[in-house]
Amino acid sequence: MPDSSLLVQPFKFLNRLRKNNNREWFNKNKDEYLEAHKHIIEFAEHLLAELNKTDIIETPTGKKSLYRIYRDVRFSKDKTPYSTYFGGGFRRATEERRGGYYFHLEPDNTYVGGGFWGPNSQDMMHIRKHLQQEPDMLREILESKKFKTNFGQLRGEQLKRAPKGFDIDDPAIDLLRYKQ
């Protein structure tokens, strides 16, 4: 797993950026940003190596996984020019391995995630069929103390009826009705 000491300097930079989110300050401290960015690239490279141990990742390098720190403020009410976090995403390889992973590194708000963002109907059918085969595995996770402490409960929009192709009496219908 990546060495957490890689994040000390980037988090110090992000804390300072939070208090000084303007171009003048950023330009004066560009060397500090570049050093922080170098540490984040190294962290992302380690993370990519770990993910590749159990999955096939399409994203070629940790550097390519990173999102820009420069914000697009054209249509935003918040005109601060820089993101106050480092984030990135890794895509799974091939048509069969859809979805991906996301990481968000921010003081007091660091998390990782995985899955699909806005799955299409084919993806939803694929996910539902897997859920239908082993609903108890997901239920065990959802009912675990660790999950409830960190995430609460499963949330998201649900269909009012059974999804097309599934029986209303299916034992997993409560899980199959989710649209997200």
Image (tube, rainbow, N blue to C red):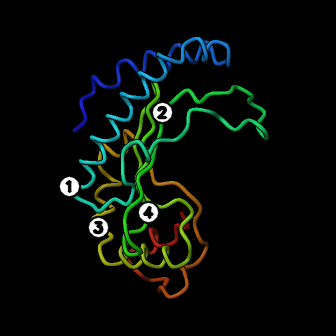
Instruction: Name the residue rendered at 47%, 16% in the picture.
Output: 32
Pointers 1 and 4 in contact (C-beta within 8 Å): no
Q: Which residue is mark 3?
A: 136
The type of residue carrying mark 3 is Asp
Q: Is residue 57 above or below residue 88?
A: below
Work out whether mark 4 precedes mark 3 in sequence or the reverse, and give the earlier one: 4
Real-space CA distance between mark 4 and mark 3, rounded to the nearest whole angstrom: 22 Å
For label 2, the residue is 86
Amino acid residing under circle 2: Phe
Label 1 residue SS: helix
**80 relative position to 19: left or right:** right
Which residue is drawn at the image coordinates 69% and 25% (left, top)? 80
Q: Which residue is mark 4?
A: 99
Tell me the quarter of the picture where residue 170 sits.
bottom left
Q: Could you give the CA–CA distance between mark 2 and mark 4, rounded to whole angstroms?
A: 20 Å
Determine whether, in the image, residue 180 is placed left or right of residue 89.
Answer: right
| Residue behind mark 1 | 53
Marks 3/2 in contact by CB < 8 Å: the verdict is no
x and y, in percent, of residue 122 in the image: 51, 79
At 30% across and 25% down in the image, what residue appears?
A: 6
Label 3: how many residues lie within 10 Å, few (<14), some (14-19) or many (20+)? few
Q: Earlier in the sequence, mark 3 or mark 2?
A: 2
Residue 19, placed above or below residue 146: above
Circle 1 or circle 3, nearest the eye: 1
Distance from the alpha carbon under mark 3 to that under mark 2 = 36 Å
Q: Give the mark, 1 or 3, whose residue is nearer the N terminus.
A: 1
Amino acid type, label 1? Lys
Q: Position of residue 68 (x, y in %)?
A: 55, 38
